[in-house]
Image (cartoon, grey):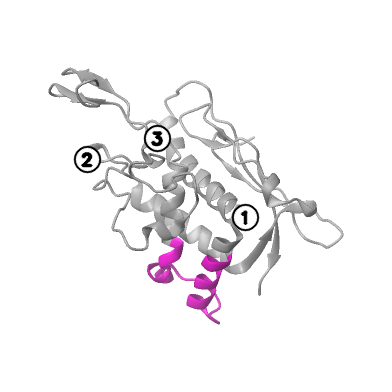
């Protein structure tokens, strides 16, 4: 047994001597516990990696493009270095698009209003001082007023705009913003990018047993503080080099 949020890989041999890997997120506890803060630092990175791999397998055009970028950047070196990450522009767009569509935590840390405000125009809602506010990062990332075709996984949407997830653009706030922004942002993003770069450099990926990508479920399960993939992701790695 592992702690909630542990990324587990299971291997088994088949006739082609290939391993079938299951990217599986253990379901978080239903209630909050003192270790939630610690678990959040591990769980969110592993969840993001699962969602990125799911979207890439679902969208082979994007998968081919990001692998070509990584392999072209690394070339014939013996390994991928962390210094290579700064040159992987498309990979960064893929990660950013995943944060938009699948923020690992839907409801950000609670806030409290300091003054009266009104949202939604004259027929909207009055928000009074000292009202507790929960910000829905998932809804913000899917808002059609901010994003064209918000339900489409399209990393190129970030190619010609400067929207980032570091708290300065409120169309994309998977880590929050202001003084209560996630303190592990830099470490978490570096972990996700470096792990993905290695997975995509060293292996090609296929669904097992001839499964069609259209049949792969993308249903979410938000039973805890994080939102993970309801159905585990099983992939067949094929060694590239």
Residue 216, x across and y down, in percent: 67, 45
Q: On the image, numbered disc 2 is attached to which residue?
A: 178
**Res. 139 mark:** 3
Q: What residue do we see at 26% from left, 41% from top?
A: 177
Determine whether the residue tagged by mark 1 lies in a helix, strand or loop: helix
Q: In this view, which residue lies farthest toward the front?
A: 122
Dot 2 crowding, Cα within 10 Å, few <14, some 14–19, many 20+: few
Q: Secondary structure at mark 3?
A: helix
Residue underneath mark 1: 57
Q: Residue at x 50, y 51 (%)?
A: 153
What residue is shown at x 61% (from left), y 52% (from top)?
58
Magenta stretch: dominant secondary structure? helix
Q: Nearer the viewer, residue 126 or 92?
A: 126
Q: Residues within 10 Å of mark 3 (few under 14, many from 20)?
A: some
Residue at image location 26% in from the left, 47% down from the top: 169
The part of the chain drawn in magenta is 64-91
Is residue 141 magenta-colored? no
- In the depicted structure, whether residue 212 falls above or below residue 15: above
Left or right of residue 99, residue 122 in this image: left
Name the quadrant of the N terminus.
Answer: top right
Instruction: Tell me where residue 120 sits by quadrant.
Output: top left
Q: Which of label 2 and label 1 is nearer to you?
A: 1
> Disc 2 vs disc 3: which is toward the camera?
3
Tell me the SS state at disc 2.
helix
Is residue 121 rendered to the left or right of residue 212? left
Callout 1 environment at 10 Å: few (<14), some (14 to 19), or many (20+)? many
| Marked residue nearer the N-terminal end (2 or 1) | 1
Q: Quadrant of the C terminus?
A: bottom right
Residue 190 at x, y = what percent? Answer: 41, 57
Q: Is residue 85 magenta?
A: yes
């Amino acid at each position: 047994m592992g702690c909630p949020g542990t990324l587990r890989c299971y291997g088994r041999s088949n006739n082609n001597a290939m391993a079938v890997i299951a990217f599986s997120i253990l379901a978080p506890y239903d209630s909050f516990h003192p270790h939630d803060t610690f678990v959040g630092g591990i769980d969110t990175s592993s969840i993001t990696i699962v969602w990125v791999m799911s979207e890439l397998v679902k969208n082979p055009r994007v998968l081919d493009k990001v692998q070509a970028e990584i392999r072209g950047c690394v070339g014939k070196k013996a390994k991928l270095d962390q210094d290579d990450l700064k040159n992987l522009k498309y990979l960064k767009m893929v990660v950013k698009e995943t944060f938009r569509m699948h923020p690992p935590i839907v409801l950000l840390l609670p806030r409290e209003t300091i003054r009266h405000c009104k949202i939604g125009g004259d027929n909207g809602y009055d928000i009074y001082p000292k009202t507790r506010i929960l910000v829905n990062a998932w809804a913000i990332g899917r808002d059609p007023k901010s994003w064209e075709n918000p339900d489409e996984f399209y990393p190129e949407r970030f190619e010609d705009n400067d929207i980032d997830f570091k708290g300065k653009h409120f169309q994309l706030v998977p880590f929050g913003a202001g003084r209560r922004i996630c303190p592990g942002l830099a470490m978490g993003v570096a972990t996700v990018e470096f792990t993905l770069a290695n997975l995509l450099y060293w292996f090609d990926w296929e669904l097992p047993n001839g499964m069609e990508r259209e049949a792969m479920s993308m249903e979410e399960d938000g039973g805890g503080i994080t939102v993970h993939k309801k159905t585990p992701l099983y992939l067949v790695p094929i060694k590239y080099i």
